[in-house]
Image (cartoon, helix red, strand yellow):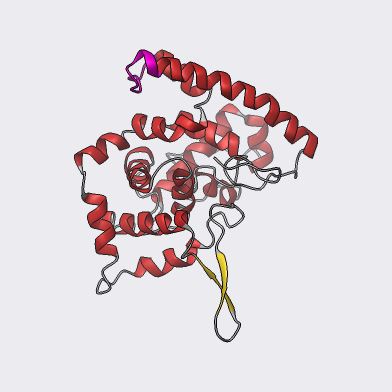
Amino acid sequence: MYCDFFRDQYGFKRSYQWISNKEYIDFEASYSHILQRRKLKWEAVLNENGGLIPSKCSKMKRYVRKGIPPSLRGRVWFHYSGAEAKMKSHSDLYQQLVLKAQDPRLENENFEVIERDLHRTFPENIKFKSTIVSDDNNSQTLSTDNVPIIQSLRRVLTAFSLYSPNIGYCQSLNYIVGILLLFMEEEKAFWMLVTIVHDYLPENMYDVTMEGSNVDQAVLMSLIMRKMPDIWNKMNGGVNYDIEKSDGNMPTITLVTSHWFLTLYINILPIETLLRVWDCFF
């Protein structure tokens, strides 16, 4: 993990938009002690289980909800999500897809879009920062040639576009893979993406119809109306919302909330909060 005064341990710039510098430092100081205690408890559980991650049970559910230590997060996500089992049953598939994607004879309309999005993926994160290069005419361009994590991001996204041709590529997937690559190697990140898209999220979430995203929005609106009526009244003027009778027109707030689900709350929640949500997700 990376850390300096201006960045957190994941390489992101520290944000002082809502809290002061002192409050941020005080939080990290107190939270670091909590993380250390959690790490010791997780290590004890692993030692009791011969170094292996225990099967899902009420105890591990409690441990996960209290937060997975950053040093173990990738390993735990990979195991509990089911991505580990997928990779074991398709041991050479990722490498085959990567090689296929590198074939210059292959025509894939998604590759160009993926290439454009590489520079847009966490540009402020030190690990994703592209280098500036100058040509003979002194014109400057961004280069990813010397940025290993972006090279991995490219391979994972192009491989996924071949694995799931009905989806190909959708903006948002680059952010999901970007977070995964902070905690695991690229082949594992690929199988995590496959598992998230095909096992965890609604069908058609990222295809051209985006029906899955609409399903998420409909469920969210219904829950807000039933569980938070005061908020619903301010959002939609108290107009009743019935999923079964919906004509497809949803409150304008869904123009904002749809992004929450497509990116799994990336760039919406603070990074530590996001990671705790992802801990529970898997």
Please report the residue visible at 57 percent of the width from the left and 33 percent of the height from the top. Answer: 224
For the C terminus, which image quadrant? top left
Residue 273, above or below 117: above
Residue 142 in percent (x, y) is at 55, 69
Q: Is residue 242 visible?
A: no
Quadrant housing residue 270: top right
Residue 209 in percent (x, y) is at 38, 56
Residue 255, above or below 52: below
Q: How many marks?
A: 0
Residue 74, above or below 15: above
Please report the residue visible at 79 percent of the width from the left and 35 percent of the height from the top. Answer: 22
For the N terminus, which image quadrant? top right
Q: Is residue 140 visible?
A: yes
| Magenta-tinted stretch | 46-57
In this rendered view, identify the residue nearer to me: 88 or 241.
88
Is residue 50 on the magenta stretch?
A: yes
